[in-house]
Image (tube, helix red, strand yellow):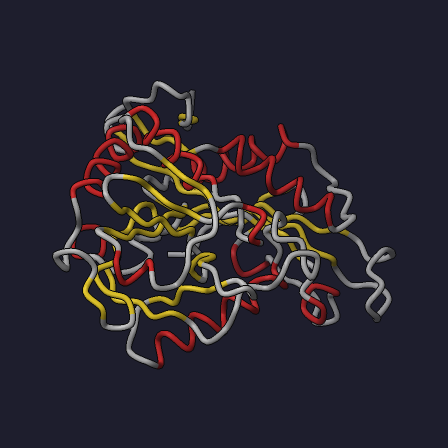
Amino acid sequence: MKYDIWFNGKFVPHEDAKVHVLSHAIHYGSSVFEGIRAYDTKKGVAIYRLGEHIRRLLDSAKIYRMQSPYDQEIIEQASIEIISRSKLKASYIRPILFRGEGPMGVNPLDNPVETAIAAFPWGPYLGEDSFEQGVDVQVSSWNRFAPNTLPALAKAGGNYLNASLVKMEALLNGYIEGIMLTTSGYLAEGSGENLFIVRDGTLYTAPTSFSILPGITRSSVIKLAEIADIPVQEGSVPREALYLADELFFTGTAAEITPIRSVDKYVVGDGKRGPVTKKLQEMFLDIVEEGNDPFKWLTYVGQ
């Protein structure tokens, strides 16, 4: 089933949401976007951390000197309406701002900024059984781009060419996902997920200064760990720490909290989801499935 798309301020049928082939974004990657989940909680359909996602969308646009035609309130409301209008429950929302048709060339300043929001069903990002069974991954031959080369704080379309190389390599080598190192050889993140190591009951993760995306689910996990008295350390983590970890897991709005059961054919821990990962998953699911939300992370549709 195809759902209507909010396109430049109005709802249009899926097949009418068209972009010109000479749009700047197609040629130069000049787009910024978000991925947002809506959950069918026991208290009603709710969007997860909507305000934080749209703020990051507009922050990304600002970094790339894209003046959004719509403010945060309008984009948030349109995101709510697209779920309500489509009658979707558990689903995925994709807002995007991009440079449209205009002068050809690297300079985008005279190209119009267009805005679209789509929503559609989307199940577990890394596989149906990944939440419990975990996934097999490799360390990629491709590094995460270095600081001051591309702005990693922006969730920009062009940045994901790096991620696509990592993902394709992993899949062709028989893995589900790849882990990127920094140009200095320290752990960064997956192609579309942040990364956490568990060792002796402490969480370790890369800092945002390592050109990782400051993930919204990453920040949720750090908050949940604080509540659960699980220590968290951000800093330089060498590659070999992956092979000595008690547990590993990815985080992301799409991936949620997904355990990693092996890296480069090294078995992680017991080769299954560990107790720290399970505890954080349970705390997360209590919010997004049960609706027990002390942090006000959920925006209910229709309320």
* Residue 100 point in image, percent of width and height: 74, 59
Q: In this rendered view, identify the residue nearer to me: 271 or 298.
A: 271
* Residue 240 point in image, percent of width and height: 34, 63
Q: Quadrant of the C terminus?
A: top left
Based on the displayed image, in which of its 4 quarters is residue 6 positioned? top right
* Residue 81 point in image, percent of width and height: 50, 34
Based on the displayed image, in which of its 4 quarters is residue 41 positioned? top left
Q: In this rendered view, identify the residue nearer to me: 300 or 227.
A: 227
Q: In this rendered view, identify the residue nearer to me: 76 or 302.
A: 76
* Residue 76 point in image, percent of width and height: 56, 32
Query: Does 68 appear above or below 254?
Result: above
Q: Residue at x 45, y 42 (%)?
A: 234
Q: In this rendered view, identify the residue nearer to me: 223 or 210.
A: 210
* Residue 129 makes an appearance in the image: no
Q: Is residue 167 left or right of residue 207?
A: left
Q: Residue at x 67, y 40 (%)?
A: 59
Query: Does 47 appear above or below 132?
Result: above
Figure label count: 0
Q: Quadrant of the N terminus?
A: bottom left
Q: Is residue 27 left or right of residue 76?
A: right
Query: Does 36 appear above or below 225?
Result: below
